C-alpha cells in the first residue's frame, strides 16, 4: 500500500508540492545517481560536481519528503524509486531536443528486447499512445486544482538565471526549475497562448510573464505566437509523468489537482511508458544506459 502524504486543505496541491521538490536540477541528479546505485554521501560527491553543503541540504529535503530513508547510507523508498519514469522522459527529451550537455547522454537500451528505444507515453488502461496534439485526453483542474495552488512556493535551481552554459538537464531545469516557467508550461498545455490570458491565469506581474515567455521562446518551446512548438509539445510525457507521480504520492484534502480521462477507452488516465522498439511496457529494472 502506498504511503501517501496528506496535504492540508487550501494549501499547495500535489502539483505545487512536486514542482517545489523535483523542479531542481540537483534533486534530479541525486535521484538519478541513486537509481544507478549511489547510496553513500561519498558516492554522490565522487559522481557529481556538488558541494558538501548543497548535497547535505538536498539529501535532507528528499529524506524529509519520503524519497530516501536513512540507515547505512541513504536508501531509495518506493516513492523515490518511482521517479524513474520522470527521469526517463527527461532523458529522452533532452537527448532529442537539447544539443549542449555537460556530459554526453548515454543510449537507452531495453533489457527485454535488447534494442535502443525511446519511451512512448501510453494510457495504462488500454495501452493506447497519447500525444499532446491528438485530443484523446479530456479534463483539467480537479477539486484541489488552481493556478495559485499549483505553483511552488520557491525554487532551488542549481544555476541562477537562465545561463546558456550546458548543464546535466539544462533545459528541463529552465522549464520546471522556475516557478513561473513551470506554470507557463502548464498553462500552454491547457491551450493558453495570449499574453493577457497567461497573466490572468498566473496572476503574476506583467514583467515576470514577459520575461518567462521570452525565455521559453528563446529555448524554442514557445513560438512567436506563444503556442507550443514541436519541441514544446514533445515535453508532454515529462509533464504527465510528473503529474502522475505527484498524485500517487501527495493527496490534498479536497481531492486531486488534475483529472483526465482517456477518451478512446473512457478510463481515468494514468500515464505509463512503452518501449518504442518492441511495444512492451517499460519497467525501471529493464532500462539500461549504455555508452
Image (spheres, rainbow, N blue to C red):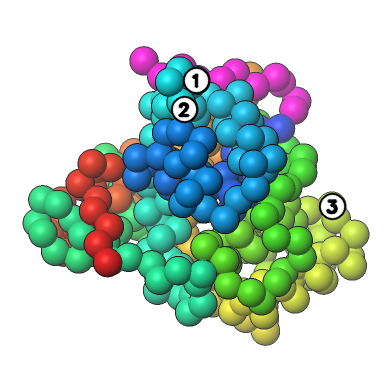
Q: Name the residue under label 2.
A: 74
Q: Is residue 8 above or below residue 128?
A: above
Q: Mark 3 points at which residue?
A: 203
Mark 1 or 3, closer to the camera: 1
Mark 2 or 3, closer to the camera: 2
| Element class at badge 2 | strand
Q: Name the residue under label 1.
A: 70
Residue 66 in percent (x, y) is at: 53, 24
| Element class at badge 3 | loop
Asked if the residue under mark 3 is in contact with the one under mark 1, i.e. CB atoms within 8 Å, the reply is no
Specify the segment rendered in magenta.
1-11
Between the residue at mark 2 and the residue at mark 1, the CA separation in whole angstroms equals 5 Å
Per the image, is 287 magenta?
A: no
Taking the spot 67% from the left edge, 84% from the top edge, the residue there is 224
Q: Is residue 59 left or right of residue 200?
A: left
Whether residue 240 appears in this view of the structure is no
Question: Are there few (<14), some (14-19), or many (20+) residues within 10 Å of tag 2?
Answer: some
Question: Are there few (<14), some (14-19), or many (20+) residues within 10 Å of tag 1?
Answer: few
Query: Looking at the image, which is closer to me, 51 or 134?
Result: 51
Q: Earlier in the sequence, mark 1 or mark 3?
A: 1
Count of labels in the image: 3
Asked if the residue under mark 1 is in contact with the one under mark 2, i.e. CB atoms within 8 Å, the reply is yes
Query: Looking at the image, which is closer to me, 169 or 178?
Result: 169
Q: Is residue 241 above or below residue 76?
A: below
Q: In which quarter of the image is residue 18?
A: top right
Between the residue at mark 1 and the residue at mark 3, the CA separation in whole angstroms equals 40 Å
Residue 86 in percent (x, y) is at: 43, 48
Amino acid at each position: 500500500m502506498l504511503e501517501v502524504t496528506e496535504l492540508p486543505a487550501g494549501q499547495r496541491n500535489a502539483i505545487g508540492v512536486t514542482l517545489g521538490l523535483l523542479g531542481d536540477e540537483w534533486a534530479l541528479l541525486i535521484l538519478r545517481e541513486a537509481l544507478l546505485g549511489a547510496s553513500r554521501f561519498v558516492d554522490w560527491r565522487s559522481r557529481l560536481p556538488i558541494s558538501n553543503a548543497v548535497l547535505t541540504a538536498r539529501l535532507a529535503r528528499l529524506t524529509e519528503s519520503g524519497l530516501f530513508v536513512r540507515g547505512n547510507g541513504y536508501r531509495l523508498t518506493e516513492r523515490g524509486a518511482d521517479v524513474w519514469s520522470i527521469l526517463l522522459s527527461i532523458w529522452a527529451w533532452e537527448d532529442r531536443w537539447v544539443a549542449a550537455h555537460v556530459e554526453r547522454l548515454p543510449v537507452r537500451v531495453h533489457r527485454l528486447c535488447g534494442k535502443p528505444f525511446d519511451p512512448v507515453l501510453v494510457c495504462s488502461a488500454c495501452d493506447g499512445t497519447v500525444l499532446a496534439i491528438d485530443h484523446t485526453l479530456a479534463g483539467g483542474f480537479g477539486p484541489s486544482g488552481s493556478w495559485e495552488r499549483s505553483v511552488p512556493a520557491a525554487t532551488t535551481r542549481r544555476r541562477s538565471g537562465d545561463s546558456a552554459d550546458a548543464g546535466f538537464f539544462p533545459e528541463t531545469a529552465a522549464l520546471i526549475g522556475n516557478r513561473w516557467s513551470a506554470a507557463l508550461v502548464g498553462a500552454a498545455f491547457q491551450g493558453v497562448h495570449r499574453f493577457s490570458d497567461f497573466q490572468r491565469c498566473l496572476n503574476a506581474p506583467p514583467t515576470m510573464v514577459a520575461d518567462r515567455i521570452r525565455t521559453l521562446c528563446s529555448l524554442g518551446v514557445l513560438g512567436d505566437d506563444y503556442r507550443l512548438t514541436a519541441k514544446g509539445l514533445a515535453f508532454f510525457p515529462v509533464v504527465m509523468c510528473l503529474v502522475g507521480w505527484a498524485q500517487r504520492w501527495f493527496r490534498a484534502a479536497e481531492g486531486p489537482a488534475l483529472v483526465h480521462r482517456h477518451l478512446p477507452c473512457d478510463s481515468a488516465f494514468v500515464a505509463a511508458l512503452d518501449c518504442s522498439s518492441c511495444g512492451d511496457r517499460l519497467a525501471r529494472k529493464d532500462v539500461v544506459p549504455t555508452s
